[in-house]
Image: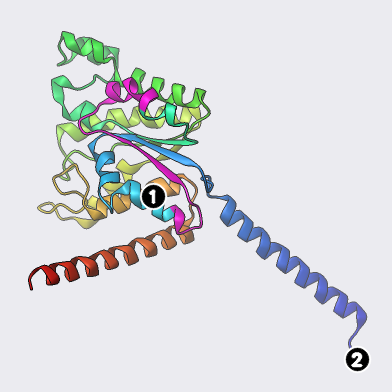
Amino acid sequence: MNNPLSLQIAAQRLAVGSLVAFSMLQTATAAIAIKSGDKIAFLGDSITEAGWGNPFGYVRLVISGLEANQVKAEAVPAGISGHKSNDMLGRLERDVLSKKPQWMTLSCGVNDVWHGKNGVALNEAALTGGIYGPEAAARGTYQKNIAAIVDQARSKGIEVVMLTSTVIHEKLINTENAKLALYNDTLRTLAKEKKLRMADLNRLFQKRIQAENKPDQMVLTNDGVHMAFEGNKLMAKGVLQAMGLNDSQLRKAEQAWSIALQAADVTKKATKGASSK
């Protein structure tokens, strides 16, 4: 015959176990900061423009990765090829603020550096003492432009996710990447000061490129700057992680991407086969 006390203890243990399991489930779900129905603006340059225009660009992968975890968010694509920090600041109201998103990712810096004398100086000292001509003053400085973008977005209640710029050529030891490092340091400092979510994509790219150790091949990009699928995937993982996805949730996202890519390959082969008949 069962001891009533033993039954009571067993019931309590079962209840506690159930509560812990439920709590863990709640924690895993609550960790994702984005909620279904939220709008996410993706502000950036050609990398972000292609991130939406390419069916497997990083913007698309972020949205599908969230959906794989039962979060249906809406993208507000705001990437324009060639744009620098001054351009993004100039169109912020039109392309982001007026759309009333809850979130904005900010990807900016490659063109500020890559465009050389037509780029945007890091700070006032670089503006007056560097390679920049008199027209550069109208473009302002990267530090001031980025701070203004962040402040204006936050004044409208928009949560900002800062993305460090990826790389300029996959051979990492060059003057452009050395200069870009200073711009990325500005982003890290600003994110820390303003308590922003940060996707440190540059560190992810550096680590992956060094681990691959293929100096004569491009691993993540098509041309040293713009993303191949692996680059888009790494960007999306970094952004999703900054949005609160844990390892298990990231694996769900990757599985969804893999299934979608396989389906696209099948469709492509079928279409090619039909057209050749």
Q: Quadrant of the C terminus?
A: bottom left
- Looking at the rendered structure, the kind of residue marked 2 is Met
Separation (CA) of disc 1 from disc 2 = 57 Å
Above or below 212: residue 273: below
Residue under the point 40% across and 20% down: 148
- Name the residue beneath numbered marker 2: 1
Q: Is residue 184 magenta?
A: no
Element type at mark 2: loop
**Residue bearing mark 1:** 62
Q: In the rendered image of this protein, does residue 101 appear above or below residue 30?
A: above
Question: Would residue 24 appear left or right of 225 to someone viewing this image?
Answer: right
Could you tell me the amino acid type at mark 1?
Val
How is colour applied across the structure in the image?
rainbow
For the record, the magenta segment spans 66-94
Confirm whether the magenta stretch covers residue 76.
yes
Residue 199: x and y in percent read 39, 41
